[in-house]
Image: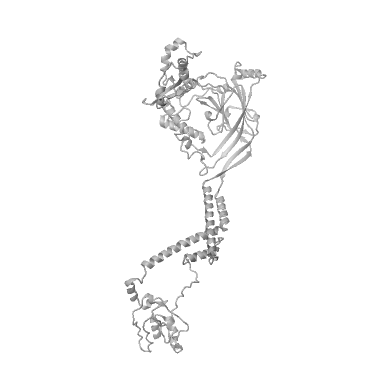
């Protein structure tokens, strides 16, 4: 037990036990069980998280174990600097070229290219909607007197400007007496203006508005300009809406006043006469079957008169075409004679036709065409569908919900619907009233100079800005992603022929109350049919998808390095290890500079006050004097240090030589300081 007590005070127990000789065997056996010392980890043992000690070691490990081709050459040829430099340059060049190719692939992907796929299908087709207009604006009974007064004023204006004497105008004396009353009844009178001569350099800066105000009736008629004056609300700004052609000027002036008169109708326009369809359409057949009243709907257009839409969306049974050809389409016989409803507004004879989708409005100004009287017009159709990609791939909209323009039409979104709605929106915002050619929201009135005296000034200014796209309507209104078009081709032939016209006109006069005197100029025939049931579908698809991008990236990686996805992970691991080693080296340098325990007098005092028993087991002091011999039994062991413990610089690991010749039970082998 005494030996045990001494052993507990021994600072280096391992060397004390090695110093015992054979005679001390009994005493050694008398000692108590020694406490087990935990084994120190060796370099061969693998830790849970282990990093390399230097960049060189990390680089050698990476080159020896990576699956990237060519990297091992940087290590194998380290004894040949020329080869090492060659493979290093080659490796860096291939690395740069590969990532240059990567940049091109990513640039192509983020440019969002599309591929156009053309498919040819053949199936039964839904017959499109067909709208036919009379080209005779209708005279409503509510505004009949105002229109007659407008006609008289227009006739008087023509006589004053051109000395034109209409056959149904007032007599010359009565005209002269009533000229002032008629011309003062309407605002914005039509005037004859002197066109300014070409400006000389000295007069180039003159305002055109000041020269156009000079009304000189004595000049040659070739120098005339006809127009009417428009002013803003407080008359501070005025301009002349002028035309070089007297016909265009009279029609536009008449149209401007006609719009004001037409806007005075109630919101619910009176229904058209029931026999209006019979007076316009003599016969109607589809697929050799007669049409009925459920196959069409009617509406009134301010410029084109009474219009009839066949096979629209309100029809419960839409027409289907199962066979192509002229006998399997729509056939109409139309009355095209002029009844002189409004001769100063409508100067064209015939009919106007437009082919469109069931859920699209009929924009007769944009997509219609005229039929010639006395001619059979056969129109063959081919259907084409276009499905575009939206989002990043194209500037289109699915249903118009993301377009900042409210749809004023009771139909689906189209680009023309959006453009007209945008113009009407700006018209209401800037002029305070709605243009009669387009639908109006609730609570808004159509423009009338009796209520809005300066709306004409605002409208023509706004129309100029609209044509220049200053309103932004064309940029706001994007095209729809799904569009269905009908490609039309027309053929013409004389109808009826000379041999058959007698009996055809006789039958039309007996059955449809057609006046035989009009003959050929009063009728026209229209055939609309599918040329073939094959229709083309153009659809867009992404040219470079994510799968294509990954495939191209993998191809480039394999071409330049002959590696795979796992090689990419190895590169990521290399970069991560480089960062960790850099951080650890910076931390080690920081701690060694500012937190070393042996630096300065404070470190020496800490070491001197540290007991010997608290020294680490791997280090033991090297005393300057030999240790005393072991005491005899019965005497108390006395162990004291004769010198202060050395600094850390004199500490060293305890040596355990197997063939140590140091005699006696010394705790540590003596060494020189």
| Residue drawn at the location 53% of the way across and 31% of the way down | 361
Nearer the observer, 338 or 612: 612
| Quadrant for the N terminus in the image | bottom left
| Quadrant for the C terminus in the image | bottom left
Q: Is residue 2 above or below residue 261?
A: below
Farthest-out residue, top: 173
Residue 410 shows in this picture? no
Q: How many numbered circles does the render carry?
A: 0
Nearer the observer, 641 or 533: 641
Q: Is residue 240 above or below residue 484?
A: above
401 sits to left or right of 508: left
Q: Is residue 508 above or below residue 63?
A: above
Coloration mode: one colour
115 sits to left or right of 586: right
- Picture coordinates of residue 480, whole percent (x, y): 52, 38
The quarter holding residue 458 reads top left
- Picture coordinates of residue 284, whole percent (x, y): 61, 26
Residue 523 shows in this picture? yes
Nearer the observer, 454 or 263: 454
The quarter holding residue 331 reads top right
382 sits to left or right of 46: right
- Picture coordinates of residue 613, whole percent (x, y): 37, 78
- Picture coordinates of residue 138, whole percent (x, y): 51, 22
């Amino acid at each position: 037990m005494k030996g045990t007590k001494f052993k507990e005070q021994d600072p280096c127990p391992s060397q004390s036990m090695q110093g015992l000789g054979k005679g001390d065997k009994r005493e050694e056996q008398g000692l108590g069980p020694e406490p087990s010392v935990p084994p120190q980890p060796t370099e061969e043992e693998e830790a849970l998280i282990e990093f390399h000690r230097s960049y060189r070691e990390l680089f050698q490990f990476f080159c020896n174990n990576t699956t990237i081709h060519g990297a091992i050459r940087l290590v194998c040829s380290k004894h040949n600097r020329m080869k090492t430099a060659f493979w290093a340059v080659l490796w860096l060049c291939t690395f740069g070229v590969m990532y240059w190719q990567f940049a091109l692939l990513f640039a192509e992907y983020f440019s969002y290219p599309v591929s156009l796929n053309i498919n040819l299908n053949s199936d039964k087709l839904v017959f499109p909607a067909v709208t036919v207009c009379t080209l005779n604006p209708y005279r409503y009974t509510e505004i009949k007197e105002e229109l007659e007064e407008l006609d008289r004023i227009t006739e008087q204006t023509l006589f004053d400007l051109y000395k034109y004497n209409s056959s149904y105008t007032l007599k010359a004396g009565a005209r002269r007496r009533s000229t002032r009353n008629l011309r003062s009844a309407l605002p914005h009178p039509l005037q004859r203006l002197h066109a300014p001569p070409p400006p000389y350099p000295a007069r180039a800066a003159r305002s055109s508005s000041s020269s156009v105000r000079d009304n000189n009736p004595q000049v040659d008629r070739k120098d005339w300009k006809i127009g009417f004056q428009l002013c803003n609300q407080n008359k501070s700004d005025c301009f002349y809406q002028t035309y070089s052609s007297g016909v265009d000027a009279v029609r536009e002036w008449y149209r401007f006043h006609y719009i004001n008169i037409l806007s005075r109708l109630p919101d619910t326009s009176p229904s058209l006469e029931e026999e209006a369809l019979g007076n316009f359409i003599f016969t109607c057949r589809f697929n050799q079957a007669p049409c009925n009243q459920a196959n069409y709907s009617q509406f009134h257009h301010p410029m084109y008169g009474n219009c009839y839409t066949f096979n629209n969306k309100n029809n419960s049974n839409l027409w289907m075409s199962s066979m192509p050809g002229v006998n399997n389409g729509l056939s109409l016989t139309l009355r095209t004679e002029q009844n002189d409803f409004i001769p100063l507004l409508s100067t064209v004879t015939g009919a106007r036709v437009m082919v469109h989708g069931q859920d699209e409005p009929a924009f007769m100004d944009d997509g219609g065409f005229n039929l010639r009287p006395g001619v059979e017009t056969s129109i063959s159709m081919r259907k084409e569908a276009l499905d575009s990609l939206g989002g990043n791939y194209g500037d289109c909209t699915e249903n118009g919900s993301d377009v900042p323009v409210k749809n004023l039409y009771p139909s689906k979104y189209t680009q023309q619907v959006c453009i007209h709605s945008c113009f009407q929106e700006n018209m209401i915002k800037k002029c305070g009233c709605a243009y009669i050619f387009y639908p109006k929201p609730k609570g808004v009135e159509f423009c009338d100079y009796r209520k809005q005296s300066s709306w004409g000034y605002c409208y023509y200014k706004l129309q100029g800005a609209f044509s220049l796209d200053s309103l932004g309507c064309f940029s706001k209104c994007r095209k729809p992603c799904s569009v269905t078009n009908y490609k039309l081709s027309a053929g013409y032939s004389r109808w009826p022929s000379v041999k058959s016209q007698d009996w055809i006109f006789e039958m039309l006069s007996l059955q449809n109350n057609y006046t035989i005197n009009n003959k050929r100029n009063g009728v026209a025939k229209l055939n609309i049919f599918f040329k073939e049931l094959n229709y083309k579908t153009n659809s867009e698809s992404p040219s470079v998808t994510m799968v294509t991008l990954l495939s191209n990236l993998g191809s480039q990686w394999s071409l330049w390095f002959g590696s795979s996805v796992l090689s990419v992970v190895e590169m990521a691991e290399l970069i991560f290890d480089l960062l960790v080693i850099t951080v650890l080296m910076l931390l080690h340098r920081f701690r060694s500079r500012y937190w070393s325990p042996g630096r300065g007098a404070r470190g020496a005092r800490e070491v001197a006050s540290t007991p010997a028993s608290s020294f680490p087991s791997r280090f033991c002091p090297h005393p300057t004097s030999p240790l005393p011999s072991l005491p005899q039994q019965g005497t108390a062991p006395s162990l004291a240090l004769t010198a202060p413990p050395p600094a850390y610089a004199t500490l060293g690991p305890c040596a355990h030589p197997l063939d140590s010749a140091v005699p006696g039970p010394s705790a540590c082998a003596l060494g020189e300081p």
